[in-house]
Structure formats: C-alpha cells, structure tokens
Amino acid sequence: MITVTDNAVKRIKQLLEKHNCEGGLRLGVQGGGCSGMSYLFRLDPKPRATDHILTFDAVNVYVDPKSFPYLDGLTLDFTESLMESAFVWHNPNAKRSCSCGKSFAV
C-alpha cells in the first residue's frame, strides 16, 4: 500500500492544474543515483494498461508493476519551510539512502 498525505495531494493538484494535465502522477523507481536506485516522479496524461492506479482525493497516482514492490509501504509527503519546499519520500524498503533523499538502496 502506498500513502499520499493531504499536503502532498494538495501540491499534486496544484501541479496538475498548473501544467494542464488531466492525468495523474507517476511514481516509480529506476536504476541510478548515488545509492543505486532513484525515484521517478512525473506528471503523466494517462496510465498504462499494467499500472496500479491509486486515487487520493481525486488525484490519480500511477505505479508500474516493476516499481510497486520497491514502493509498497511508501508514504509520500510534501513539506514547506523557510528553507525549502519539497516532496519527501518515507520508504520502509530503503535500507539506506543518500543525503538528498532522492535515491536509495534495498
């Protein structure tokens, strides 16, 4: 199960509207980054036939079947402070991650 917090949903809605995207948010993983795997995060106009489609307050999140096991249990949050505004990944599958939080190892 993947969880998207209310703050993250609100920000995703803003991004979808800003970029005139009627689809949803694609979450995934790919090889690379300083820890071995990096997160994929982009707006996508429509899901693929094999995607897991999750819905949070009318926001669709698409996850491909190869990425899903790496993201199962993930909580995606969004935080704003004087220093930064960013999505934050809380992934229980990550054994270690880089200091920026954008890549991880399992």
Image (cartoon, helix red, strand yellow):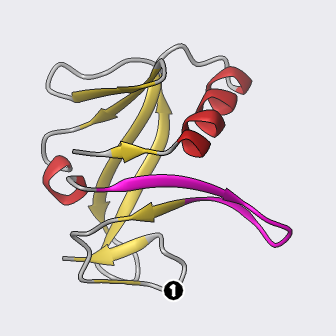
The image quadrant that residue 81 belongs to is bottom right
Direction from residue 15 to residue 106 in the image, left or right: left
Q: In the visual, does 86 lie left or right of 51? A: right
Q: Position of residue 29 (x, y in %)?
A: 29, 56
Please rate how many residues cluster around mark 1, counting C-alpha atoms within 10 Å: few if below 14, some from 14 to 19, many from 20.
few
The relative height of residue 95 versus residue 38 in the rendered view (above or below) is below
Taking 28 as reference, is 85 above or below it?
A: below
**Residue lying at 37% horizontally and 66% vertically, measured from the top left:** 38
Q: Quadrant of residue 47?
A: top left
Report the number of discs: 1
What residue occupies the far right of the structure in this picture? 82
Which of the 4 image quarters holds residue 10?
top right
The residue where tag 1 is placed is 99
- Tell me which segment is drawn in magenta: 74-87
Residue 50 spot, x, y in % from top left:
14, 26
Q: Amino acid at mark 1?
A: Ser
Q: Closest to the observer: 6 or 27? A: 6
Regarding mark 1 in the picture, which secondary structure is present there? Answer: loop
Q: Residue 51 in magenta?
A: no
Q: Position of residue 19 (x, y in %)?
A: 68, 25
Residue at the (20%, 29%) spot, across then down: 51
Horizontal and vertical percent position of residue 80: 74, 59
The residue closer to the viewer here, 45 or 89, is 89
